[in-house]
Image: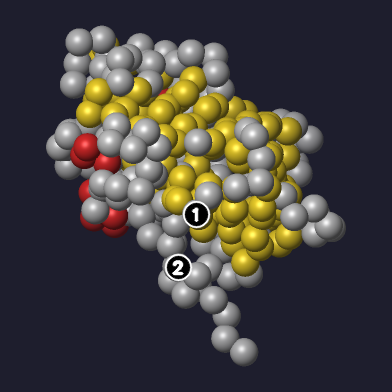
Amino acid sequence: MSVLPSGEQWTIRAGEYAGTVVSVGGGLRGLSYAGREVLVGYPEDQPARAGIGQHLFPWPNRVTDGKYTFQGVDQQLYLTEPPRSNAIHGLTRWANWERVDDGTDESFVEVAHRLHGQPGYPHQLDLTITYQLDATNGLTVTARATNVGAGDAPYGYGTHPYLSVGRRIDECELEFTAASWLEVTPDRLSPIGLADVAGSQYDFGQARKLQDLDIDNAFTGLPENWEVRLTDPATGNSARLVSDTKWMQLYTANAIGRAGLAVEPMTCPPDAFISGEDLVVLKPGDEHTTSFRVSV
C-alpha cells in the first residue's frame, strides 16, 4: 500500500465549513466554506508547496546563515534555504505527526509531535496543534509547545495559511492595521530595520485593491487582536484571519500564481534567534500557547 505525500488525512466539518488535516507537518491541506475555498489547498497526491498550511516550529521565517548564539553557546543550523544561505521555517514541516484525540468529534482534530534535539537546536519539545471548527466562527487553530528537556530552549512559532476568495488577489481588496513594517535585503530577505506603515505602499488601514503590489514582509505594532481581511469586491466574498501574535508576515504568493495571500501569525520576527527580539525562552517544563482563527 502506497503512502500519500502529505500522509494520513483527517477531515473536519461544521456547518458549511470543511477542512483536511494531514500528518505530514501536522498541516492543513485546505479549508472551504459552502464549497468555495477560504484557505488555499493542494491535492492529496502532492506534497505541500510554498509552505501551504504548514506550521513553523521552533522558529518562523529565517535565521540568516543559520548561525546564532544562545546562552553563550554558538549554534549552526542546517541551511534549508540554500539559494539564500538561510535556515528557514523551523524543523517540523516535513516531520510525521500523530493524531492524539479520540476521533469522536467530526469538528475537532489534535495532532502531536516530539521534537528531539539535533545539530543547531539541541533541545526537546513536545508540540501539539488543535483544529476546532465551528459553524458560526470558523476554524480556530491552537499551537502549543512544552519544553521537556533539561535546559532552556529558544522558541518561536509561525504558520503559513493562504487566504483565498477564489480568484487572483490582484483585484481583491486588502485591509489590516499595523504601525511598522520590516524592511529586508532584496537578495537574502535579511532584516534591515522597521519603517512606518502610514503613508507607505503597505498602508491598508482602509481597504484597497492589491493590484500588482508585491509583499513579502513582516509587520508589527499590531492591535491586540489583529485582523487581516481579503475581499473580492465583485462578489462580496471575503476571508479573514484573526490572531494576537506580536508579528505577522504577509506574502503575495507569486510562487503559487497569486492565488492567495499568505497571512502568517508569528510570535517573533525574522532572525529572532540572532537578535533575541520577542524570542520566547522556555525553561524546563514551561509551556507556550498561541492561536489564530480563520473565517468568512
x then y, percent, for residue 41: 44, 57
Q: Amino acid at mark 1?
A: Gly
**Measuring 66% from the left and 52% from the top, which residue is drawn there?**
13
Q: Is residue 64 left or right of residue 5?
A: left
In the displayed structure, would residue 56 be above or below residue 3?
Answer: above
Query: What is the secondary structure assignment of the residue under circle 2?
Result: loop
**Measuring 47% from the left and 23% from the top, which residue is drawn there?**
227
Q: Is residue 86 visible?
A: no
Q: Which mark is residue 267?
A: none
In the displayed structure, would residue 2 be above or below residue 26?
Answer: below
x then y, percent, for residue 132: 69, 43
Q: Amino acid at mark 2?
A: Pro
Q: Residue furthest bottom?
A: 1
Q: Nearer the viewer, residue 122 or 64?
A: 64
Query: What is the secondary structure assignment of the residue under circle 1?
Result: loop
x then y, percent, for residue 107: 72, 50
Q: Residues within 10 Å of mark 1 (few under 14, many from 20)?
A: few
Q: Is residue 188 visible?
A: yes
Which quadrant would residue 251 be assigned to in this image?
A: top left
Q: Residue furthest front?
A: 235
In the displayed structure, would residue 173 be above or below residue 85?
Answer: above
Which residue was labeled with disc 2?
A: 43
Q: How far apart are the alpha carbons under marks 1 and 2?
A: 15 Å
Q: Nearer the viewer, residue 31 or 26?
A: 31
Specify the quadrant that holds the N terminus. Answer: bottom right
Q: Is residue 95 left or right of residue 97?
A: left
How is the structure coloured here? secondary structure
In the displayed structure, would residue 123 be above or below residue 199?
Answer: below
Q: Which mark is residue 35?
A: 1
Badge 1 or badge 2: first in the primary sequence? 1
Q: Residues within 10 Å of mark 2 (few under 14, many from 20)?
A: few
x then y, percent, for residue 176: 38, 21
